């Protein structure tokens, strides 16, 4: 059993087994952090060579039929613009770092307002993102730059070897008074309580699951003050929803085919499944000295 990354306790309580996870889900008996207690496939970034981990993640998901790259890119840009509009309410200009920038969709829209840089451990994704901005191909802990006004990361913290180390590294690269923005699944949600082991957020490369209380603890331990936590939705298309449903039931596949035939796959709307939270925090002026 792996010790809790948040408080260090080593006596977790078993919660459930899920076919989607890389090991049993447990809850820390002291701080209540949910995490995968043992790792069969070692898919966490920060635990070894980024290229090796990326290859293992790719193989772990080879059974999934993914949405077309063009459609993924279209929806990703819509979601990037929504996130950018929210971030600009807190800080409208300056230097912005995105950790886990994938192919660079958020950087593409953010560079109209900020001096942007990315971090991406996956070699293939980093190569694509370099067409948009400068990208450090590795984990954030090895990034030599700092003094960013904003550090943002969307759906990355649940993938890393140590969320505590990950958040500290992000905080160290933000200037005093700067901002940190995280988006991650919220396990204190109706979808988890209803679906349990079949929750859609249970996939092989997800290892840590936060709620508002544990994410606040984590950020405060890194010298950050949480300003806001809110449930957020996303832009989705009929094609995306049916593609994801097909991972659970074969009945979705003929409907997906029918939507393509009728040219309804790109029908787009905003949905809020109520199991994703976006967290905005600011760095205390003296946090580096205090830590």
Image (cartoon, rainbow, N blue to C red):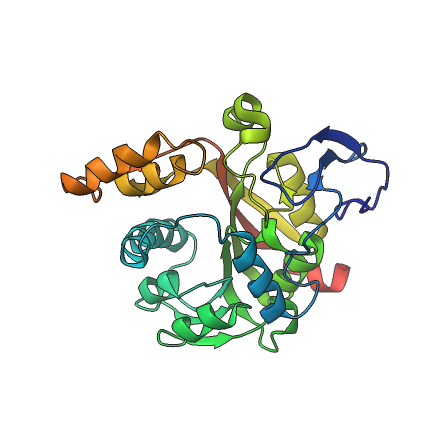
Up-down: is 112 above or below 134?
above
Tell me the quarter of the picture where residue 22 sits: top right
Residue 110 appearing in the image: yes
Residue in the image at 38% along x and 50% along y:
66
- Expressed as whole percent of the image width and height from the top left, the position of residue 84 reads 36, 55
Toward the viewer: 86 or 238? Answer: 238
User: Which residue is drawn at the image coordinates 60% and 53% (left, top)?
Assistant: 159
**Residue 28 sits above or below residue 145 on the image:** above
Please report the residue visible at 57 percent of the width from the left and 23 percent of the height from the top: 193
For the question of whether residue 176 can be seen, the reply is: no
Question: In which image quadrant can residue 288 be found?
Answer: bottom right
Q: Nearer the viewer, residue 125 or 148?
A: 125
Return the residue nearer the eye: 206 or 271: 206
Whether residue 222 sits left or right of residue 130 in the image: it is right
Q: Nearer the viewer, residue 256 or 117?
A: 256
Furthest-left residue in view?
262
């Amino acid at each position: 059993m792996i010790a809790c990354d948040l408080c260090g306790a080593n006596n977790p309580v078993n919660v459930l087994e899920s076919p989607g996870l890389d090991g049993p889900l447990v809850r820390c008996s002291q701080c209540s952090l949910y995490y995968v207690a043992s790792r069969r496939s070692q898919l966490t970034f920060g635990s070894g060579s980024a290229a090796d981990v990326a290859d293992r993640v790719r193989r772990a998901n080879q059974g999934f039929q993914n949405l077309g790259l063009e459609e993924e890119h279209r929806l990703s840009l819509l979601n990037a613009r929504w996130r950018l509009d929210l971030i600009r309410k807190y800080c409208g200009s300056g230097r912005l770092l995105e950790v886990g920038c994938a192919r660079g969709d958020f950087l593409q829209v953010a560079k109209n307002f900020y001096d942007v840089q990315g971090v991406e451990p996956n070699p293939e994704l980093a190569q694509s993102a370099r067409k948009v901005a400068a990208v450090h191909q590795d984990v954030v802990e090895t990034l030599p730059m700092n003094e960013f006004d904003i550090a943002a990361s969307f759906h990355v913290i649940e993938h890393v070897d140590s969320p505590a180390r990950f958040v500290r590294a992000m905080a160290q690269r933000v200037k005093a008074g700067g901002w940190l923005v995280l988006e991650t699944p919220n396990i204190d949600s109706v979808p988890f309580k209803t679906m349990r082991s079949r929750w859609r957020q249970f996939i092989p490369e997800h290892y840590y699951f936060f709620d508002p209380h544990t994410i606040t603890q984590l950020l405060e331990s890194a010298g950050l003050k949480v300003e806001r936590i809110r449930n957020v939705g996303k832009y989705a298309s009929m094609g995306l929803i049916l593609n994801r449903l097909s991972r659970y039931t074969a009945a979705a596949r003929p409907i997906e085919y029918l939507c393509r035939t009728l040219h309804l796959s790109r029908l787009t709307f905003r949905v809020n499944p109520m199991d994703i939270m976006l967290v905005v925090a600011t760095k205390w002026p003296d946090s580096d000295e205090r830590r």
